[in-house]
Image: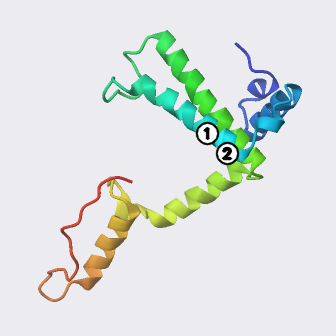
């Protein structure tokens, strides 16, 4: 299955998807329905459908080696629905999604410096608290901060 010119050129850009989604909606006179709220709700619905695919599978290995081709195809369709609604929502809101994503990566690099976060799933507030904790230790090495609080996750 080919997707057109962009595939021949070596990939699909967010800009190409944005234009195709805008054309798709315009041809169907759907712009009238594509308010930020409606698109967000549609996106959330698609994330729900994506979640259902994984709901009872437990943890699955990378590459999904035990999945059937039909399952992988269905996953690709649901991932695509999420991406397409996200691209459309960003377009309707006047956000350059590519630039916003790169900016967010830069912010995350500041929040999660390699030296403090490598190999850790701690949230940035915990990483920074641990870093500050080192500075708060006296000659005894005992922290002056409350280290009993724990919140795992990124």
Percent x, y of residue 72 = 50, 17
Percent x, y of residue 98 = 69, 49
45 sits left or right of 146 in the view? right
Q: For the C terminus, which image quadrant?
A: bottom left
The secondary element bearing badge 2 is classed as helix
In the rendered image, the vertical position of residue 124 relative to residue 64, given as above or below: below
Whether residue 63 can be seen here: no
Q: For the N terminus, which image quadrant?
A: top right
Give me the disc on residue 8: none
Give me the disc on residue 41: 1
Question: Does the residue at mark 1 contact the one at mark 2 (Cβ under 8 Å)?
Answer: yes
33 sits left or right of 37 in the view? right
Q: Residue at x 35, y 27 (%)?
A: 61
Q: Residue at x 26, y 84 (%)?
A: 136
Q: Quarter-wise, where is residue 147 in the image?
A: bottom left
**Type of colouring:** rainbow
State the separation of the CA atoms marked 1 and 2.
6 Å
The secondary element bearing badge 1 is classed as helix
Whether residue 74 can be seen here: yes
Q: Residue furthest left?
A: 140
Residue at which label 2 appears = 37
In the rendered image, the vertical position of residue 102 relative to residue 61, given as above or below: below
* Pick the front one: 43 or 137: 43
- Say few, some or many: other residues with alpha carbon within 10 Å of mark 2 (under 14 / 14 to 19 / 20 or more): few
Q: Residue at x 51, y 27 (%)?
A: 49
Percent x, y of residue 44 = 56, 38
Q: Quarter-wise, where is residue 128 in the image?
A: bottom left
Q: Residue at x 77, y 46 (%)?
A: 92
- Say few, some or many: other residues with alpha carbon within 10 Å of mark 1 (under 14 / 14 to 19 / 20 or more): few
Q: Quarter-wise, where is residue 138 in the image?
A: bottom left
């Amino acid at each position: 299955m080919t997707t057109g010119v962009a595939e021949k050129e070596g990939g699909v850009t967010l800009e190409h998807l944005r234009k195709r989604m805008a054309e798709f909606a315009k041809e169907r006179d759907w712009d009238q329905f594509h308010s930020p709220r409606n698109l967000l709700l549609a996106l959330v619905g698609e994330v729900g459908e994506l979640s259902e695919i994984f709901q009872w599978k437990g943890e699955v290995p990378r590459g999904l080696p035990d999945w059937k081709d039909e399952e992988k195809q269905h996953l690709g369709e649901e991932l695509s629905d999420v991406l397409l609604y996200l691209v459309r929502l960003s377009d309707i809101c006047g956000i350059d999604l590519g630039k916003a994503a790169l900016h967010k990566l830069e912010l995350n690099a500041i929040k999660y410096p390699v030296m403090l976060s490598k190999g850790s799933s701690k949230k940035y507030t915990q990483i920074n608290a641990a870093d500050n904790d080192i500075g708060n230790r006296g000659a005894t090495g005992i922290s002056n901060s409350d280290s009993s609080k724990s919140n795992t996750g990124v």
